């Protein structure tokens, strides 16, 4: 039996990239023709020209806060759906709130690959403790398991004692849920004297998987596989037995951009905001900003999958903070950088001195000239309506952690 879900996972990277870029113009054309949202935002775009990552990077980013505002003004979905609401299988809401629909296509959210990578095969029973209540979480893995031919125990959340009893009865091999909930079920099983040793693979997401927790499961013979996904995108990346990052799904184009902008980071491995373009038809999201920080690697993986991998969740990209009563956004720092080609990277560090806010803009630039620092300070004041000191640092000095605004204030 193959270790890989299909041949797409082991393609030559150049072949994969060519296929993704070949599919991109048609998806942009579909989004523009079939949705009111992209008919407006991409009105001036010729889809045929969007056949490269450079061309994709020139398109506007779709952000969650924009969807929330638009859906309030134009319910239910603000024209984002190419799928008629009456043709949807299920209608959901997720935090925001953002409203979305699930189509009828098998494995709609792409959960099957992650389950397969975790060793689950046709006939293996999966206990699913992701929520089924209003949100897509439970359905992402339920639909993926059914696509594999795996029966599903629709546990949802809560009723821990009953869940332990049901698992003891059905003896599932797999479990899907948040990283910590399976631990609660297993401990309840121990308390009740139940045998829950059938579980061998746990597919987790929607929360941090800390190393001590992974070790705790390992001591019980359970392999844990992390995933990254959202209600809007489904599964974006999934962990394999190699446990060296999460492999990007085959039907998604992933970019890492400088937070607050739509501009890709300079190098693979640089930390930035995860932006995803879907190549599926029902809700054709183009450059959807997840708000999450991560980085990618293209180093070979022992699992044999050749796609780039996401190096875990590294925080939130929305670093907006208030300084002297004024909100400062990452977009504004990006604007300052654009005004000075000499700047490679910038980072606003907000500290407190004697109880007063003390913003310091640190910029990587070859110029260590005080006059240049004064010019940058003037740009910062113009853009942010605040004064800040400017510190010139050597190129490569700023940390590679995706932070554009670093609020280090501590008030005593």
Image (cartoon, helix red, strand yellow):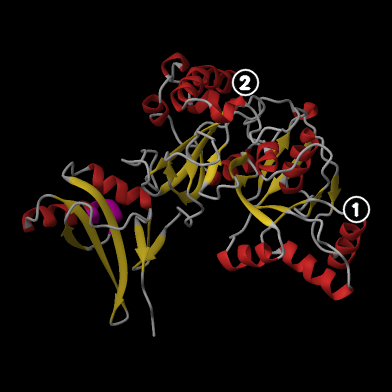
Q: Which residue is mark 2?
A: 34
- Residue 103: which quarter of the image? top right
SS assignment at label 1:
helix
Q: Secondary structure at mark 2?
A: helix
* Residue 76 seen in this snapshot: no
Foreground residue among 19 and 134:
19
Q: Is residue 177 visible?
A: yes
Q: Residue at position x 89%, y 73% from top?
A: 192
Counting from the top left corner in percent of width and height, residue 174 is at 77, 50
Labels 2, 1: front one: 1
Q: Is residue 361 magenta?
A: no
Q: Residue 77: image x %, image y %?
A: 67, 36
- Residue found farthest to the front: 1
For label 1, the crowd category at 10 Å Cα-Cα, with few meaning under 14, some 14 to 19 and many 20 or more, is some
Please identify the quadrant where the N terminus is shown: top right
* Residue 60 located left or right of residue 346: right
Residue 382 drawn in magenta:
yes
Q: Quadrant of residue 71?
A: top right
Few, some or many residues within 10 Å of mark 2 (<14, 14–19, 20+): many
312 relative position to 133: left or right: left
Q: Which residues are magenta?
A: 380-385
- Quick check: marks 2 and 1 in contact, CB under 8 Å? no
What separation in Å lies between label 2 and label 1 (alpha carbons)? 45 Å
Mark 1 — residue?
Answer: 170
Please, is residue 242 above or below residue 169 in the view?
Answer: above
**Residue 52 x/y as whole percent:** 40, 23
The one nearer the camera, 51 or 177, is 177
The answer to which of marks 2 and 1 sits earlier in the sequence is: 2
């Amino acid at each position: 039996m193959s270790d890989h879900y299909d041949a797409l996972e082991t393609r030559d990277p150049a072949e994969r990239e060519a296929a993704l870029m070949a599919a991109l113009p048609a998806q942009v054309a579909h989004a523009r023709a079939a949705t009111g949202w992209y008919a407006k935002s991409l009105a001036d775009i010729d889809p045929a020209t969007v056949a490269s990552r450079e061309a994709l990077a020139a398109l506007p980013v779709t952000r969650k806060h924009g969807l929330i505002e638009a859906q309030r003004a134009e319910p239910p979905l603000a024209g984002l759906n190419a799928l008629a609401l009456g043709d949807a299988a299920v209608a959901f809401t997720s935090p925001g709130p953002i409203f979305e629909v699930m189509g009828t296509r098998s494995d709609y959210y792409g959960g099957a690959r992650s389950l397969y990578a975790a060793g689950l095969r046709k006939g293996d029973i999966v206990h699913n403790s992701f929520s089924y209540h209003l949100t897509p979480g439970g359905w992402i893995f339920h639909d993926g398991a059914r696509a594999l031919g795996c029966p599903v125990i629709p546990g949802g959340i809560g009723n821990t004692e009953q869940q332990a009893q049901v698992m003891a009865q059905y003896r599932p091999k797999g479990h899907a849920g948040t990283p910590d909930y399976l631990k609660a079920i297993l401990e309840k099983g121990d308390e009740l004297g139940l045998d829950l040793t059938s579980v061998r693979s746990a597919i987790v997401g929607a929360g941090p998987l800390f190393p001590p927790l992974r070790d705790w499961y390992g001591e019980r013979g359970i392999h844990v596989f992390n995933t990254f996904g959202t209600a809007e995108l489904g599964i974006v990346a999934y962990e394999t037995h190699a446990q060296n990052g999460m492999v990007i799904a085959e039907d998604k184009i992933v970019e890492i951009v400088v937070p607050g902008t739509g501009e890709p980071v300079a190098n693979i491995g640089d930390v930035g905001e995860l932006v995803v373009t879907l190549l599926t038809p029902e809700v054709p999201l183009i450059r959807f900003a997840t708000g999450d920080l991560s980085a990618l690697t293209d180093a070979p993986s022992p699992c044999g999958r050749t796609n780039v991998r996401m190096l875990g969740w590294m925080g939130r990209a929305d670093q907006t903070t208030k300084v002297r009563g004024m909100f400062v956004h990452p977009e504004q720092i990006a604007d300052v950088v654009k005004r000075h080609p000499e700047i490679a990277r910038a980072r606003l560090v907000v500290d407190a001195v004697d109880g007063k806010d003390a913003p310091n803009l640190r910029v990587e630039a070859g110029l260590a000239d005080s006059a240049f620092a004064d010019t940058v300070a003037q740009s910062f004041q113009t853009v942010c309506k605040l004064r800040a000191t400017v510190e010139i640092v050597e190129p490569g000095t700023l940390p590679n952690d995706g932070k554009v605004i670093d609020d280090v204030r501590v008030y005593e």
